[in-house]
Amino acid sequence: MRQRGRPRCLTAPRSAATAPWAWIEPRRGRIDHTYLDGVTSQLRAFTDQGIRVYLDFHQDLYSRYLFNPESWYTGDGAPAWAASGYPRESCGLCVHWGQNMKSNTAVTAATYDFWHNRDGVQDSFLGAAGAALEHVKNALPADEFKLVVGVDPLNEPYAGKYDAGQTSQQWERDLLMPFYHRFRARMDEAGGVAKPAFVEPLVFPLAHPPPGQIS
């Protein structure tokens, strides 16, 4: 006999709500709470139905603002003010979007600077992410905030470029893991103590130092 009503599931359905940094903090030090109201509405479209969702501070190739209007490629993530002052982007003879991670000098330079916190750019990202989490927690009813099951701090992390003699394992230890610890601390401060951070490893692990890479 078919049972009426909501079906029982072994695992509840879940989805992601993306919130790129560029839209959270379009001007340095200015959080766009109107945009975050929209993010909260997007989350509620899921939580109202009892669907679990996680918040994703998504990025691709660091920032769309690195790319020329006529470029074959584009990115997402960092705001314009955090993507200025870099060389004109070019991926050369790239035949795939992902090659920009290693071959586009604007992308590699900006990404390198993010991980080394040049001009406090990583500090700003963490501040914006924390502000977004606080906004969501305060805007959602407590029973619905429970359905926000966690946060993806930064998808597909990659070095941009390595310091001379540096391996990918050293990069993860010295740059990626400290970033995750800093994000975790900011997440806890924003009220996400009980929620996991869905962290990701380096996209392109490298056993030996790449030849010719310098800081």
Image: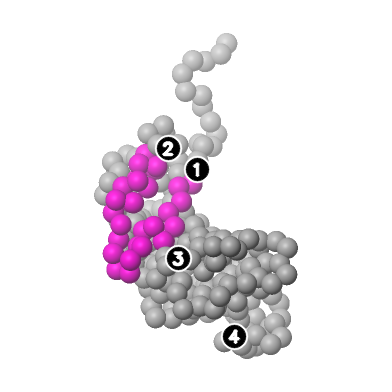
Badge 1 local density, few (<14 within 10 Å), some, or many (20+)?
some
How far apart in space, not on screen, are marks 1 and 4 (Cα)?
A: 37 Å
How far apart in space, not on screen, are marks 3 and 1 (Cα)?
A: 23 Å
Tell me the kind of residue under disc 1: Ser
**Element under disc 4:** loop
Viewed as shown, does residue 136 lie left or right of 196?
left
* Residue 15, numbered label: 1
User: Do callouts 3 and 1 mark residues in contact (Cβ within 8 Å)?
Assistant: no
How far apart in space, not on screen, are marks 4 and 2 (Cα)?
A: 43 Å
In the rendered view of the protein, which quadrant contains the C terminus? bottom right
Q: Badge 2 is on which residue? A: 46
Residue at 37 percent of width and 47 percent of height: 39
- Front residue of 60/134: it is 60
Residue at 69 percent of width and 72 percent of height: 92
* Residue 78, numbered label: 3
Q: Which residue extends farthest top?
A: 1
User: Do callouts 2 and 1 mark residues in contact (Cβ within 8 Å)?
Assistant: yes
Q: Badge 4 is on which residue? A: 163
How many badges with numbers are in the image?
4
